[in-house]
Image: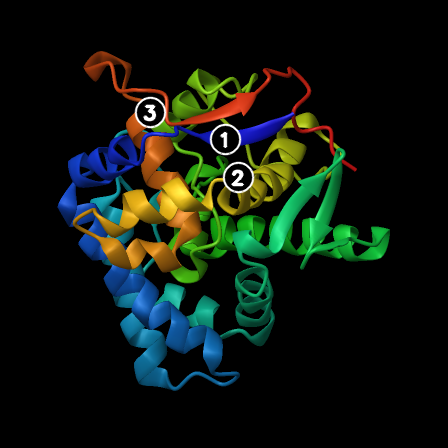
Amino acid sequence: MSVKVVDNAQLITDAINKFPRDYQVGYFKCRAIGRRYLADATPADHLLTDLATSLRCTLKDWGAGKQKAPTLRSEGEVSSALREPGIRSSLAELAAAPLPELTVVQQRRYMIGKPAAGAALIRFDSNFLFVLRTLGERLFLGNTNVTFPMKAALLITGFMPALDSRVRRGLQRGNFSGMDKTQYLLRDDAAHADTKKISRLPFLLGQCWTTCEQQLQEGVAKSTFPELRQEPGRVFDVLLFMQGDKQKHNPILVTCDPPDRDWYELQ
């Protein structure tokens, strides 16, 4: 079992070009500040304020506070959370494991091209859950779902797609079974199937980025946002989001091949 993208690079280009431009602009603005924040062990107050402002603005544009989505905390509260060394270091650790350095070989997770030791995988899973849980608590009020913590993590680190309803529907259409839930709760249990789907997905997408690099790079390079070549997590976020729009009959761009109901059961 592996994850593949469509062979036709033009379909990748078309999907990126059809994705709402304002969402891309907000993403790149926030990511630029996020990179500076992650690179500085003791971010200055003005940098924390800039990131908090950009993050809140973009998350509002992406639906925070609307309908049943959680409400954002104040700019001061967000800035205070980002100032905490434990939160910044955990986000930096996540950003230090980009998708191209993750892969899967014979149902086993690899990091930096090598089989990952058990302790390293436990640390990876634990840190990832800590980031999502902490962002959910410190940036939002009444958050219980993975969606907005994952959006915040994506905006700061670029790590992997945020599992909102459209992306989950895109995954389901691509044969990732069990992703078509109306809610995707934020859980503490690393062994729970839903948690495994979150922590294993980046390894499968990393494998896909490596094995399908030619059509991905070509498709992105010809798009209106060629700078996405350096943002694999965002590329998959866009492709799966577009794939999740059934009303427009968008093509299948990312697939689990062959279909496997236990696709997330990796060592």
Which amino acid, by three-letter code, is at mark 1?
Lys
| 182 to 16, vertically: above or below | above
Where, quadrant-wise, is the N terminus in this rendering?
top right
Q: What percent of the width, then of the height, locates residue 152? A: 40, 52
Label at residue 243: 3
Real-space Cα distance between discs 2 and 3? 16 Å
| 221 to 261, vertically: above or below | below
Q: What percent of the width, then of the height, locates residue 235? A: 36, 45
Which amino acid, by three-letter code, is at mark 3?
Gln
Helix or strand or loop: what does disc 3 sit on? helix
Q: What percent of the width, then of the height, locates residue 203? A: 61, 43
Residue indicated by mark 2: 208
Dot 1, crowdedness within 10 Å: few (<14), some or many (≥20)?
many
Which amino acid, by three-letter code, is at mark 2?
Cys
- Mark yes or no: residue 227 visible: yes
The residue that appears at 73% across and 28% down in the rendered structure is 265
Label at residue 4: 1
Looking at marks 1 and 3 on the same chain, the residue that comes earlier in the sequence is marked by 1
Real-space Cα distance between discs 1 and 3? 14 Å
